[in-house]
Image (spheres, grey):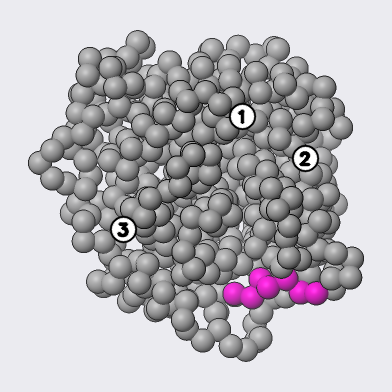
């Protein structure tokens, strides 16, 4: 039981967390926040381990180091933070208007005065969870300030954009699912641990954002499947290992966290359940493939088409599949839950949120195993032996998913011109969701019923395949250096994020 916490603790003892401006094979700069989430996840999953308190200590250390690039209200007034160039104290918000807003809450991600969505989103999650564990109001206050920054400068209410330069007040008008997913997870953690319940205005914002992120044609295809990082050319070399392949599952987890903590109204809750169901069916039916050297199913980065040309292990695709299968456990049927079982689910959700957050080669191998082993045990509490043969309601397939009426796409009148996803016509996203949810779902034709035991076997197969790869790399002396950087293939908007 202590092997995973021990490995994480040993990693902390041999790593300088104050100088993580290096690449662990996949990402740069943002690993500090992700590692903090990884340590908190291990703390929650292995609370009886001898290193349990050490894991929290390391998470606090990572947060403290990351906070050196946080812009406080005083920093914003001064227009400077140590290690960052001078910047504007205020900038015009995306929602328009003549009033400028303080840039307090920004968090530099790569030296210059700029911030990206995934960095500030994971910072909000880490701050909120540390507040829950440590009780220090500073954590929650900084999370709140960063949420206000995102709402003002990275969000138009229906999308979280990729980056913002508060030195020039310039927005990077690209968007990726992980930026939105991490922010949703951050909102969920913040409202779950804040003593005051969310206001009506705050709930309206969360619901509008969640529905819009599901319905946007920017990454949701007309069949309901997330098309980010999709394979669009069957003849190209798709032995593709860019970390973008794992982004989609972060959005799914963010939606699920909002669902789990009760932030979604009935309309958006139902839409979220259907969306997760569609992604589950898509990954199970279309993303899996086999390779001669690994005796387990492998999952590719594209959820829309069979992985015809993939010939080797794909780490981002495997991470995304494991995260999605774990999330899908939460929307399947379960016996009437007691208070204790609900607390267990919230605790497990926190674990899930941290694992994909640690997208580094060093930590991924540990955390995928954590997911599979802990979730396998927890899953037994959701489905009794007598119910094992009952089909889980992953009923929404790509034929049934209510996105065929693309004319009911989203629009939001308060958007700044040019900053919203391209809409088809004028209904708001939540009202569109309500209309679409009301469509007839009747008939079983084309459904893919899956029982709970099959889902658990899929989780085990994901972990088994990763273990096989680790053994092969260990024998061959591989270090994962073949993993390359760059934007997802056939991604149409903007330049690379600069990982």
Q: Which residues are magenta?
A: 390-396
- The residue carrying mark 1 is 133
Q: Which residue is mark 3?
A: 421
Location of residue 206 with respect to 107 vertically, above or below: below
- Residue 389 x/y as whole percent: 85, 73
Where is residue 249 drawn, in percent x and y? 57, 51
Q: Which residue is mark 2?
A: 369
Category of crowding for the residue at label 3, using alpha-carbon neighbours closer than 10 angstroms: few (below 14), some (14–19), many (at least 20): many
Of labels 3 and 1, earlier in sequence is: 1
Q: Foreground residue, 94 or 297?
A: 94
**Residue extending furthest toward the bottom:** 443
Q: Earlier in the sequence, mark 3 or mark 2?
A: 2
Task: Say what secondary structure mark 1 lies in.
Answer: helix
Is 393 contained in the magenta span?
yes
User: In the picture shown, does residue 165 fall above or below 451?
Assistant: above
Q: Residue furthest left?
A: 98
Magenta-drawn stretch contains 268? no
Looking at the rendered structure, the number of numbered marks drawn on it comes to 3
At x 46%, y 37%, the residue is 121
**Disc 3 from disc 2: Cα separation:** 37 Å
In the image, residue 454 above or below residue 395: above
């Amino acid at each position: 039981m202590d092997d995973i916490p021990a490995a994480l603790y040993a990693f902390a003892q041999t790593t300088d967390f104050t100088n993580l401006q290096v690449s662990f094979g996949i990402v740069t700069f943002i690993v500090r926040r992700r590692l903090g989430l990884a340590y908190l996840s291990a703390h929650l999953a292995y609370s009886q381990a001898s290193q349990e308190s050490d894991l929290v200590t390391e998470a606090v250390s990572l947060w403290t180091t990351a906070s050196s690039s946080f812009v406080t209200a005083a920093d914003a007034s001064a227009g400077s933070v140590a290690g960052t160039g001078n910047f504007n104290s205020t900038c015009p918000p995306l929602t328009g208007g003549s009033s400028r807003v303080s840039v307090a809450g920004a968090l530099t991600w790569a030296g210059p005065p700029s911030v990206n969505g995934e960095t500030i989103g994971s910072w909000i999650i880490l701050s909120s969870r540390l507040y829950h564990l440590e009780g220090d109001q500073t954590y929650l206050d900084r999370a709140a300030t960063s949420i206000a920054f995102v709402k003002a400068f990275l969000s138009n209410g229906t999308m979280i954009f990729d980056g913002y330069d508060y030195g020039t007040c310039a927005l990077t008008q690209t968007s990726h699912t992980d930026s939105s997913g991490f922010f949703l997870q951050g909102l969920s953690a913040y409202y779950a641990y804040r003593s005051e319940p969310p206001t009506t205005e705050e709930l309206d914002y969360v619901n509008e954002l969640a529905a819009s992120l599901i319905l946007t044609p920017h990454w949701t295809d007309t069949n309901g499947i997330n098309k980010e990082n999709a394979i669009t050319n069957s003849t190209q070399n798709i032995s593709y290992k860019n970390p973008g392949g794992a982004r989609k599952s972060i959005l799914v987890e963010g939606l699920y966290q909002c669902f789990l903590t009760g932030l979604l109204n009935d309309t958006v809750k139902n839409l979220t359940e259907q969306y997760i169901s569609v992604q589950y069916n898509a990954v199970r039916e279309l993303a899996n493939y086999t390779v001669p050297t690994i005796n387990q199913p492998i999952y590719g980065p594209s959820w829309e088409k069979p992985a015809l040309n993939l010939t080797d292990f794909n780490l981002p695709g495997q991470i995304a599949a494991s995260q999605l299968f774990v999330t899908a456990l939460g929307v399947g049927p379960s016996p009437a839950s007691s208070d204790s079982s609900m607390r267990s689910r919230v605790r497990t959700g926190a674990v899930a949120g941290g694992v994909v957050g640690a997208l580094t080669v060093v930590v991924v191998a540990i955390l995928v195993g954590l997911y599979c082993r802990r979730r396998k045990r927890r899953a037994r509490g959701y489905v009794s032996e007598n119910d094992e043969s009952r089909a889980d309601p992953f009923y929404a397939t790509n034929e049934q998913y209510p996105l065929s009426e693309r004319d009911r796409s989203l629009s939001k009148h308060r958007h700044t011109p040019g900053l919203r996803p391209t809409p088809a016509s004028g209904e708001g996203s939540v009202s569109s969701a309500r209309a679409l949810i009301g469509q007839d779902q009747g008939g079983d034709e084309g459904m893919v019923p899956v029982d709970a035991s099959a889902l658990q076997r899929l989780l085990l197969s994901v972990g088994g395949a990763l273990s096989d790869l680790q053994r092969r790399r260990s024998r061959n002396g591989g270090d994962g250096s073949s993993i390359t950087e760059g934007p997802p293939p056939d991604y149409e908007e903007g330049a690379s994020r600069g990982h």
